[in-house]
Image: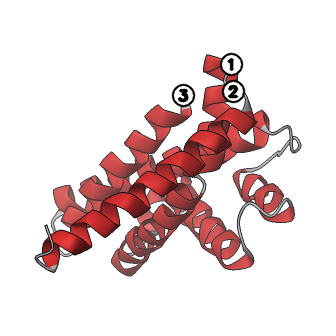
Amino acid sequence: MKIEENILRFEKHLKGAKALKDKNLSDYLIYNTLAMECFQSANALIDIAEAVVIKKKLGFPSTYSEIFEILNKNGIINKEELEKAKRIVFLRNLIAHEYYRIEEKDLKNMVDLLEEMKNFKKRKWFSLSLIIAHEYYRIEEKDLKNMVDFLEEMRNFINKVKKMVKEGEL
């Protein structure tokens, strides 16, 4: 599965989990649906992280937690993100292997952690885009960086225009 598909999968299941988080989790169907949404979102996050490790040739992780440890060791995620990711992996494994043991508060915590890891996805998107563009479209990294610089300049221009409109200058 492509990185883009995993990102969309992560977002889809996180959205589903957030919609269920504050529902009545004593309802068997809601509880199990929330658990599955969290599980799927966590799996997508792991797949995204694993793709970065593989594409950047950072090592050969043997566990899900080790994937994030490698990312941390290589400066791709910080220590706080590492701890959150490891907690997500732990809760994911509870769902996968010891389903009956995960508590409602743990599911709610998992939704919060996944939401916080959304920032990892956003911040790392440029890095992932470089990998995708270089591998699939054979666009050189320097050309992509030039494109990003240009887009940043255009965003600044658009923000100036928005400000001028807001202030009645246009």
Q: Name the residue under label 1.
A: 138
Residue shown at the point (56%, 60%) measured from the top left: 123
Q: In the figure, residue 103 lies in which quadrant?
A: bottom left
Q: What element carries label 3?
A: loop
- Specify the quadrant of the image occupied by residue 107: bottom left
Q: Which of marks 1 and 3 is nearer the N terminus?
A: 3
Amino acid type, label 1: Arg
How much space separates mark 1 and mark 3, taking CA atoms?
Answer: 16 Å
Identified at 59% across, 50% down, the residue is 149
Q: Mark 3 points at which residue?
A: 2
Q: Label 1: few (<14), some or many (≥20) within 10 Å?
A: few
Q: Which residue lies furthest to the front in this view?
A: 169
Residue closest to the eye, 154 or 169: 169
Q: What label sits on residue 134 in the rendered view?
A: 2
Q: Which secondary structure, mark 1? A: loop
Residue 39: image location, x then y, percent: 44, 52
Which amino acid type is shown beneath numbered disc 3?
Lys
Tell me, yes or no, whether the two marked residues, 1 and 2, touch with CB atoms within 8 Å: yes
- Asked if residue 95 can be seen in this view, the reply is yes
Measuring from the top left, give residue 112's x and y in whole percent. 40, 74
Q: How crowded is mark 3: few (under 14 residues within 10 Å), some or many (20 or more)?
A: few
Spatial CA span between label 2 and label 3 = 14 Å
Q: How far apart are marks 1 and 2 (CA)?
A: 4 Å
Residue 3: percent from left, percent from top: 55, 35
Drawn side of residue 103 relative to residue 126, left or right:
left
Location of the C terminus by quadrant is bottom left
- Nearer mark to the viewer, of 1 and 3: 1
